[in-house]
Amino acid sequence: MKKFLFIVSLLCPYVLFAQAIEGTVTDKNRQPLVGASVFWLNTTTGTMTDEHGQFSIKSIDPSHQKLVATYMGYFADTITISNQKSVSFQLQASKVLDEVVVSEQRDGVIMSNLTPIKTQQITRTELGKSACCDLAGCFETQIAIQPQTTNVVTNAKELRILGLSGVYNQVLVNGLPMIQGLSYTYGISSIPGTLVENISISKGANSVLQGFESISGQINVATLKPSESDKFFFNAYVNSFSEKQLNTHFSLKKGKWSNLTAVHAVFPANDFDRDGDQFLDVPKIRRYLISNDLQYGNERDWGWHSRVGLRYVDEQRVGGQVNFNEKTDQGSTAVYGQLVNMQQPEVWTKTGFRLNDQHHFVLMASSFYQDQNAYFGTVKYDAQQTNFYGNIQYELNYADHSLKTGFSYRHLNLSEQIAFTDNTLNRTYDGQYLKDEHIAGGFIENTLKLFDGKLTWLAGVRMDHHNQFGWLFTPRTLLKYDVSPNSVIRANVGTGWRTANIFSENINLLASSRNVIFASDLKPEQALNTGLNFTQKFENDQASGFVSADLYRTDFNNQIFPDYDSSPTEARIENFDGKSVSNAFQLEFFVKLWQQFEFKTGYRYLDVYREIEGEKVALPFNPQHKTVTTLGYKPLSQKYHIDMNIHWYDRQRLPNTQSNPVEFQRPDYSDPFTTVNMQFTYNFKQFEFYGGCENIFDFRQKQPIVGWQDPFGPYFDTSSVWGPTRGREFYVGMRFRVP
């Protein structure tokens, strides 16, 4: 706590800044008008609204105190400014308008300078630059997120931020924690990219409203809103491995009511074994998903608003040796295979009442049940999870404050049953594992604007009571200082905690021959995160873009990370209260030229380590240096666009296998490597045709499975994956939409 208070004191500046006016521009229905012009009357000083209809404009000479807002197809409005620090324009649509075609293309990546939390928003424009079959594939053009394979046999993935395991960032769907516990392993793959409206990424400590878990950052996936989606959409996709996907959704709208129904289907690939290790290069995945999203009203309008969603997922994953038959070889020692069957129904809602512009009440709730039955070689794993989350929140806007407070409750019931169909390896971790969590908490968070809006201070705290570990305190604070309308400095500090779900979050433990040893009773993981970042935007007639630099440090008070190094045949699970640190630096540059060319490049440095007996030990599977470069071209006609991204990875430390027999040993470090992806998209009226190639130069980590020669022996391990294993992949697809 002393360290926390000391850092907070360093972040508090005592300087005076120039006055600025902030506000919003909406239509009469309070819908934001994106790209509206706001300027001082009889001057050339002005700005434009962002994607939320918000703006910030610097005050000028007192003789010019009339602020004007204009937007194509709407009557201009003028407000006389006296002592206001914020204003709201509501523009009326023109009754008579000549035929005008207004088109707008949202930037692929948006960084708002108005919020205290640095948030990078990936829009549908950016998602359209690659296939984006599911959420795990939506980050091919980003440096901040690193998708990491955790089990190559079934292609399980996680999303890493700041070089830390994906369990330390919080993945939200429409602001709700739907991916946790048993749903963590395959949950990110169950969200089809065609249903994603945008993805918001924030690193480090941020808001306490959604919970206590976001240690390294937060990923919020906003799905399509029924009121704003196409009337009909259809997507078909196939790749060179014969994987196929079909996606469709349609919406109905009447008055304040709107509804969106979606269907998603994935069909398995053919058999491929290019590296001759007798294991499938591409697992066979079959998935069916149906969802329905009912919406009433709009949360920006006064009165009631609500969204209620239902979803059902049925999925099967099959991997292993080429001749494995999932119907007859389950748990067999004659041929090695992995089989995962799971079903998950879920329901969620976000319902609120906006009394006026100052008072807003919101209820957010979600629940899901997952039933999973699996075989990992001779390990039988059956698990069921029931999850419930509820959050009641009150929002108050007054003067220069925005206050949010409320209560939350979380319940997780997880039952895991592990058995061995053959136990010649003398593994000892079979049995039943039960977890029943009840976490009730309260929170309060206030955003305060100081020095005429130049300084924004967000401070939040929450107290949560865990039924096993008692009361836990989570404080966080963030500061934003506007050096100028286009230059922003942000700083943040805060704590986070979580409880570990060992098997569902480390599925590779079940897939390997290691014996799992629980060396201590597990306590909550806790960490302190501090961060500093700078964003500089620029815009003129020829170019627009930004430069961004981030620096973050995470210090763990307790961390639970399977120890693979002590013994090649064991994985030790225990509390680690020694020094465990993640240092991350990121530099990113983006420019858009003449509304046609895009160039973005990013560099990331990671120093993620533990100190064991005074020695600094780097954690595995983290490239210390990584770069991502993206190139794009779209003519003014917008008939087609060409996109390319290039990833370079530095070497990565690998788990220690030196005590294995020579034929089962791996190097201490991986090789550096580069992958290049490209896509061409052509628009023809309501049709959009796309095709591309991932990993153009066919780089592969060959034979990624340790001990593939003897999959039932003591050295078999599927977790040593540091690079692509599928190789070059071609794909084609078609999208059809009725706006």
Image (tube, rainbow, N blue to C red):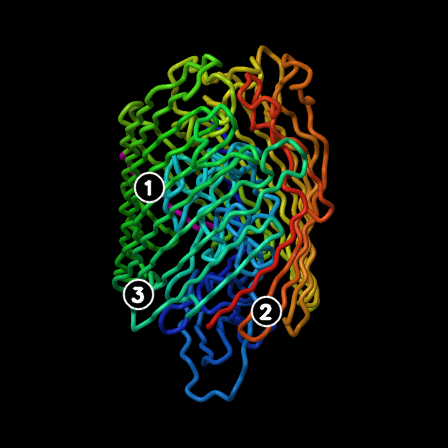
Identity of the residue furthest to the top in this view: 613
Tell me how far mark 2 sits from mark 3, CA to CA: 36 Å
Tell me how far mark 1 sits from mark 3, CA to CA: 27 Å
Q: Residues within 10 Å of mark 3 (few under 14, many from 20)?
A: some
Q: Quadrant of residue 306?
A: bottom left
Which stretch is magenta? 440-450
Residue in the picture at 68% in, 22% down: 668
- Whether 146 is among the magenta residues is no
Q: Nearer the viewer, residue 496 or 677?
A: 677
Q: Amino acid at mark 1?
A: Ile
Judge depth for marks 2 and 1 and give the one in front: 1
Residue in the picture at 71% in, 49% down: 696
Q: Residues within 10 Å of mark 1 (few under 14, many from 20)?
A: many
| Badge number at residue 444 | 1
Horizontal and vertical percent for residue 237?
55, 58
Q: Amino acid at mark 2?
A: Thr
Residue in the picture at 45% in, 45% down: 457
Question: Which residue bears the numbered disc 2?
Answer: 45
Question: Which residue bears the numbered disc 3?
Answer: 297
Question: Tag 2's secondary structure?
Answer: loop
Tell me how far mark 2 sits from mark 1, CA to CA: 38 Å
Circle 1/circle 3 CB separation < 8 Å = no
Left or right, residue 305 beside residue 21: left
